[in-house]
Image (tube, rainbow, N blue to C red):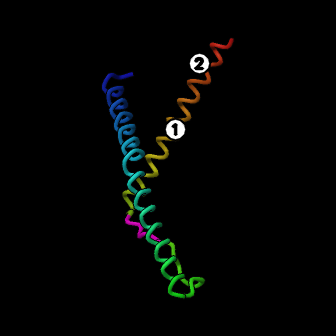
Amino acid sequence: MNKGLKIFLIIIFLLYIALYFSYQNGYYEIRNNEKKILTEEMIKEYEEDLKNGVDVTNKEYTVIKKDYSNVYTKNLLKVSRKIENSLDRIIKYVFNKLGSTINE
């Protein structure tokens, strides 16, 4: 294989891993924390409505956040998922072959 192609593939793979872990470790936690805070606020609002005698059966206490994604982010997420699935299949295949050769 060409040396330049190997370096390019390694850089792409490392970039993917870095972005994947940054997404998993940082962004996800922030989003969960925001959901927790909003949930606590909705619980407090619900309790206040109960204390004040407001009919709670018709009121929504869930928060629907606006989706700010666009065509580019959606497409990049699709590409990222395809890369992830491909790498997952490749790694599983390699380790299955390694396991079968060791067991024989």
The crowding category of the residue bearing disc 2, from other C-alpha atoms within 10 Å (few below 14, some 14 to 19, many at least 20), is few
Name the residue carrying label 1: 86
Residue bounds of the magenta highlight: 63-68
Quarter of the image that includes the C terminus:
top right
Secondary structure state at the residue bearing disc 1: helix
Q: Is residue 85 magenta?
A: no
Instruction: Confirm or deny contact between disc 1 and disc 2 (CB under 8 A).
Output: no
Question: In terms of depth relative to the viewer, which is nearer, 4 or 44?
Answer: 44
Identify the residue shown where x is 63% and y is 14%. Answer: 101
Identify the residue at the far right of this view. Answer: 104
Secondary structure state at the residue bearing disc 2: helix
Where residue 66 sits: x, y (%)?
Answer: 41, 70
Disc 1 versus disc 2: nearer the observer:
2
Residue 94 in the figure: left or right of residue 79: right
Q: Is residue 99 above or below residue 5?
A: above
> What mark, if any, has residue 98 been given in the picture?
2
Question: In terms of depth relative to the viewer, which is nearer, 53 or 98?
Answer: 53
Q: The disc labelled 2 sits on which kind of residue?
A: Leu
Q: The disc labelled 1 sits on which kind of residue?
A: Ser
Marks 1 and 2, the one that precedes in the sequence:
1
